[in-house]
Image (tube, coloured by chain):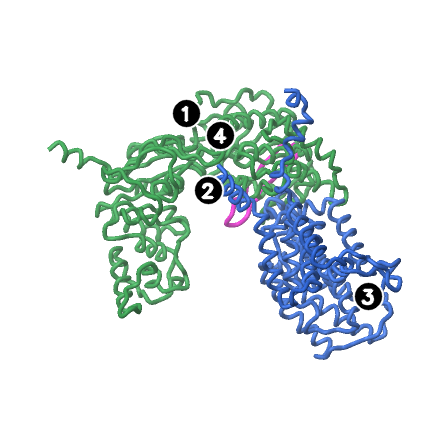
Amino acid sequence: MEIRVTEATAPRAELLAITKTFPGVRALENVDFRLNAGEIHALLGENGAGKSTLIKVMTGAVWRDSGKMMLDGQPYEITSPAEAHALGISTVYQEVNLIPTMSVTKNLTLERQPRRYGLISWRQANERARERLKRLNLDIDVERPLLTYSVAIQQLIAIARALEEDTRVLVLDEPTASLDAREAELLFSIMRDLKARGIAIIFITHFIDQVYQIADRISVLRNGRMVGTAPTAELPRLKLIAMMLGRELERTQGVRASSAIVAAGEPILNVEGMGRRRYMGNFDLQLRAGEAVGLAGLLGSGRTETCKLVFGAVHPDAGHVHFEGKPIAIRSPRQAVRLDIGFCPEDRKAEGIIPELTVRENIVLALQVKRGWLARLPRDEQERIAQEMIRTLGIATPDADKLVGQLSGGNQQKVILARWLASKSRILILDEPTRGIDVGAHAEIIALIRRLCQEGLALLVASSELDEIVQVSDRVEVLRDRHKVGEIVGGDVTRENIIHMIAGS
Amino acid sequence: MVHADNPRAVAVRRFSFGELTGRTWFWPVAALALIFLVDAVVSPGFFSIRIVQGRLFGSLIDVFYRGTPGALVALGMAVVIGTKGIDLSVGAVVAIVGAVMTNLIHRDFSPVSVLFLTLGAGALCGLWNGFLVAILDIQPIIATLILMVAGRGIALLIDEGLIVTFRSDFFSAISTGQFLTVPSRIIVAAGTFLALWLVLRRTALGLFVESVGANSAAANLTGINAKLVKIGAYTLSGLCAGIAGMLICGDIRGSDSNNAGLFMELDAILAVVIGGGSLVGGRFYLGLTIIGVLVIQGLTTSILVSPLPFQFTMVVKGVVVLIVLLLQSRRLRESIVGLFLRKTS
């Protein structure tokens, strides 16, 4: 009797103390995750929180360093998504992994075509495809090419492909990202249906509204740790946002040391009504010497978009910019760099470092750009600047001629900071300056940002870490759904105030 | 103990063979040295250089002489590959340039204006490639394939489908003449090399090219005009192919659009790769590219002077190139070393 009781309450899937480290980054740390049968479980967190790593560990795409995985009370070990699929764990990724020019049938029977006399029997294949779609109550012409259907239907076809008779766990990674409200509702009704059949669904999204619409329970990851799991009904929106953004337990005082030096005076950069259709709503922004402005908001709220517009990496289609009181249009990063503006992008690997070049070359690059190609910095001058930056920023590298691609994340970030400091930037735009950086380097970078600000730089810091924003900012611009919703100044900059403004209460 | 206290002694001891073989220049130079060594054994007269009719003469000079058009094309290719691109059209540009030059000579243009217009035609071809790659954002291999295919057609149209010959003392002198006993084309190539080295390595342009090749998006966000750098690289490649075309055309005193520069792009890419350039971009080496050209040309010439029938040329070339490339791969080297260590231990 007792055994049956434990069986009944045993979760469908259970991950215990999962740890996974990538070179330089701790992606998951001691994460516990429980998934019940017949529930829709929202898995939330900002970029880099560890959501996708957790899913990859669970579905065999990535091998964990340590920890235990259970499925229906049985420990399981898998080394590939195919093995996970065979065990009944199916995943539908954000980018639909289907072939748009092929027919629905071909997409649904890609791995196993029914054969007759050694040839593919398309009649049987169509039959099988229709059966699969019937599980989702979908009745469409399976012989038409996939691309003739709407994105929502394509999404459902992707789910139909993942779904087997014996599927126990279904992972949906951002399934509603490209759906409108009506299409999302169609998907939700099918999710509810699957749930009623006892399938456990993990729903990854950054739409908070949809979480409250459909999820039974919510788990929040942040910086590779599980912040908590709670039934949706018991987790008010405000608390959820706090869980996603803050780190209340680890650091008691996320309060900034002094707001006494809030700089007055004329802004170096004054942006009025800047925006771009379907990219970012119009916003005002002033950057002053010695003042740090924080950009706070949830994932997808427009933090990166704001940075890129100000830096000229994306062309605004509205607004005016005054630089030191003079009207100007910043049309390209090149022009921004000439105005002594620097930008440390969020995606350090793709847009920041130049991995095949040395630390020295990466550091002097922006300065060299400003001097123009004809006025090459002499080698010993390059060496001197690089050594100085390595010393002042504490970049851990054996020598200046090591390739940047071989450094750790924190040191790569310091190299990019050094690039802009070496070029004597007066305005520095930092998008997620501590993303993917381990704890020690994290504190160093925050201290560095504060020092730079005191030395008279004008800073714009976008971050998903609320405490980070509170620590560094004299002023905070709060964003929601690609609009600036308000500004918090000086002593009012607190976690609570920012959270309230994000939640819109 | 005494040694350990002396930093210089440590430095000397640390410079191991393993470190030497890890250098970019080691394997191309070693390959060239080996080829020359084999030549010295197989044909004892390989290194003897005489002066015949006021001109340097010998197998070694011959390697340099025949290598010049390929070297010019390869230099431009090295820069393009440095930007993470590739230029398949160089052979066709050689044909176009030859046809343009022949045509202009027949129209009685002065030699100097023919020279500039011809090189201008080469640069224009490169500019077209740069436009397709940088502005229209077409993949380099496809973008330059267009001119590779159409280019010979354009050359044939200019030549009206014929092999057109000409007489020009000026261009014959540039291509096949000599200056102070040195073949003039070697001087042309050396001058081009020097000019490129000055422009790319004594200014910051080389660094910008490598930045764009290694990470175009990051280079752009650092303020480098990545599009302009790419356009410049392809234009340079077109110009280099133009100089090569001028030499080839001056050599045969005519324009043979069907055959001029045929398969040159492939040898040029090979030379760049042998010289340590990587097709994923981010690094280019002008000097080592020349070594790469000499490896390829040295092989061809060695087989011609050796008892081996000339039919072997292509096959031997392929095998040697494969060996050099495999040796450059750090992973393969390490696994081979690992194999030996396991055997001995």
What is the spatial separation of the Cα atoms under label 4 and label 3, in whole angstroms? 65 Å
Q: Is residue A159 above or below residue B248?
A: above
Q: Is residue A141 above or below residue A491?
A: below
Label 4: which residue? A438
What is the spatial separation of the Cα atoms under label 2 and label 3, in whole angstroms? 66 Å
The colour one sees for chain A in the rendered image is green
What is the spatial separation of the Cα atoms under label 3 and label 1, in whole angstroms? 80 Å
Q: Nearer the viewer, residue B303 or A445?
A: B303
The quadrant in which the C terminus of chain A is found is top left
* Chain of the residue displaying label 2: A
**Residue B70 appears at what percent x and percent y?**
71, 60
Q: Secondary structure at mark 4?
A: loop
Mark closest to the chain's N terminus, 2 or 4: 2
Residue A279 falls inside the magenta stretch: yes
Mark 4 is on which residue type?
Asp
Mark 1 is on which residue type?
Glu
What's the residue at 80%, 58% (across, down)?
Answer: B188
* Chain of the residue displaying label 3: B
Left or right side of B11 for B55: right
What's the residue at 27%, 47% (across, down)?
Answer: A88
Label 1: which residue? A248
Label 2: which residue? A300
Frontmost of labels 1 and 4 is: 4
Q: Which residues are magenta?
A: A267-288
Chain (blue): B
